[in-house]
Amino acid sequence: MSGIVESFGTEAAGQLPGGQEGMRLAEGHGGHHPAVRPALLDAALEVFLERGYAEAGLTEIAARSGIPGGSLFQHYGGKRGLYLALWEEFREAQERRTAATLAVERGHGVDDPSALFVAGARAYLQGAWDNRRLGRLLVQDDAPAGFDGLRRQWDRAWVRRNARLLEVDERQRAGRVRVSVLTTVIGGAARELGDCGDETEALEIVDEVCGILVHLSTPPG
């Protein structure tokens, strides 16, 4: 999943590591009528969750969206484009949420790296709960060919950005491992929230994980 802090940009969403092609979003997908994107993505999410990515059919997605199949291909180029657009939507929503939280915290005078990190983590986890259906799709193994490589690339970027937020020197192995562990804790908790059906339980999970992060993110000594 996406990282905690400031906006990461969109370069990784369009291309696989090593310059592989075929996973790019369809050209001009942002320029279509504003009603088309949510209709197609909502329908794609429903069908992907019900059928799995491999078994999902474009005909069914188009029928549920009420958008002609030709428009689907025009805007997204097929199932892979739809899946990547859903991933981009989740990632960007999470980035906006966490960046806004950090801006508020800094505006209140908070400058402790650990406190900022935990605040960002809480915002990210609350976003994972709010967008749990989409998050549940994105952690499944049933995904477009090559998506695992893209996800691993993004996870590495997440660790690097968390290291910067925590002011950890990545050249030191101990610090690098500590940030990797923290990031893994957040990612694991986000997956649990995707399967959680009760809001009270979800909020308890968020509180519990943030309490763990407070201890783990405190520098040794």
Image (cartoon, grey):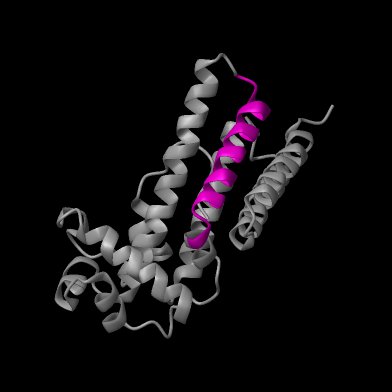
Q: Is the magenta stretch mostly helix, strand or loop?
A: helix
Q: In this view, does 50 lie above or below 108?
A: below
Question: In the visual, does 135 lie left or right of 201?
Answer: left
Residue nearer the viewer, 54 or 113: 54
Quarter in which the C terminus is drawn:
top right
Q: Position of residue 120 (x, y in %)?
A: 57, 35
- x%, y% of residue 83? 38, 68
Q: Where is residue 116 in the image (x, y as percent from the top left)?
A: 61, 28
Count of numbered circles on the image = 0
The reply to whether residue 23 is visible in this rendering is no
In the rendered structure, the answer to whether residue 23 lies left or right of residue 190 reads: left
Residue 62 location, x and y as percent? 25, 76
17 or 180, nearer to the observer: 180
Residue positioned 60% across, 19% down in the render:
111
82 left or right, relative to 128? left
Residue found at the far right of this picture: 221
**Which residue of the protein is positioned furthest toward the top in this rendering?**
109
Q: Toward which corner of the image does residue 45 lie, by quadrant?
A: bottom left
Q: Residue at x 66, y 50 (%)?
A: 202
Q: In this view, does 131 lie above or below 163?
A: below
x 20%, y 61%: residue: 36
Left or right? Give the position of 216 relative to 30.
right
76 inside magenta stretch: no
Instruction: Confirm whether residue 103 shows in the render.
Output: yes
Which segment is the magenta one? 111-133
Location of residue 12 with respect to 206 vertically, above or below: below
Q: State the residue at coordinates (54%, 42%).
A: 4
Is 114 one of the magenta-colored residues? Answer: yes
